[in-house]
Amino acid sequence: MIIQEHFDVNGRDFIRTTSDAGRYVVRDGLEYSEACDPAEYGRTYTEGELMPAEERNQSEIEAKAEAYDILMGVSE
């Protein structure tokens, strides 16, 4: 299933799009492990092929590192 998460960067609303099934997200025939777009663009994505396990794990590690930095006050 496609998951969309809103986040703010310097007062501007963005949407992060991922798949909860470890699949690429696809728009206009291009595959992404995740997509981050300004909310006003209104982009939509579908699920594509399964990502290789090592790529799924790397995305999860990066997300956890980002969350840790936010919790520790290093970034917003």
Image: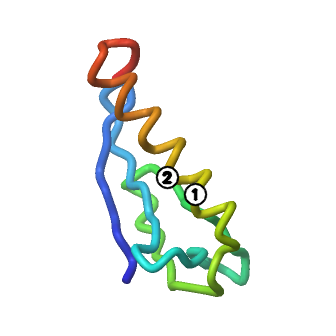
Q: Can you tell which quarter of the image residue 40 is in?
A: bottom left
Give the position of the C terminus as an image quadrant. top left
Under tag 1, what secondary structure? Answer: helix
Q: Is residue 39 above or below residue 12?
A: below
How packed mark 1 is, by other alpha carbons closer than 10 Å (few <14, some 14-19, many 20 or more), is: few
The residue located at (41%, 66%) in the rendering is 42
Left or right: where does residue 7 sit relative to residue 36? left
Under tag 2, what secondary structure? Answer: helix
Left or right: where does residue 5 sit relative to residue 55? left
Q: Which residue is mark 2?
A: 60
Asked if labels 2 and 1 touch by Cβ distance under 8 angstroms, the answer is: yes
The residue located at (38%, 54%) in the rendering is 15
Residue 31 position within the rendered picture, expressed as x and y whole percent measured from the top left: 69, 74
Q: Which mark is residue 8?
A: none
Q: Can you tell which quarter of the image residue 11 is in?
A: top left
Left or right: where does residue 24 sit relative to residue 6? right
The residue located at (60%, 75%) in the rendering is 24
Disc tally is: 2
Q: Is residue 23 above or below residue 74?
A: below
47, 55: nearer the viewer:
55
For badge 2, the amino acid type reads: Glu
Residue 12 position within the rendered picture, expressed as x and y whole percent measured from the top left: 35, 35
The residue located at (46%, 60%) in the rendering is 41
Residue 9 position within the rendered picture, expressed as x and y whole percent measured from the top left: 38, 31
Q: Which residue is mark 1?
A: 57
Q: Is residue 39 above or below residue 52?
A: above
43, 76: nearer the viewer:
76
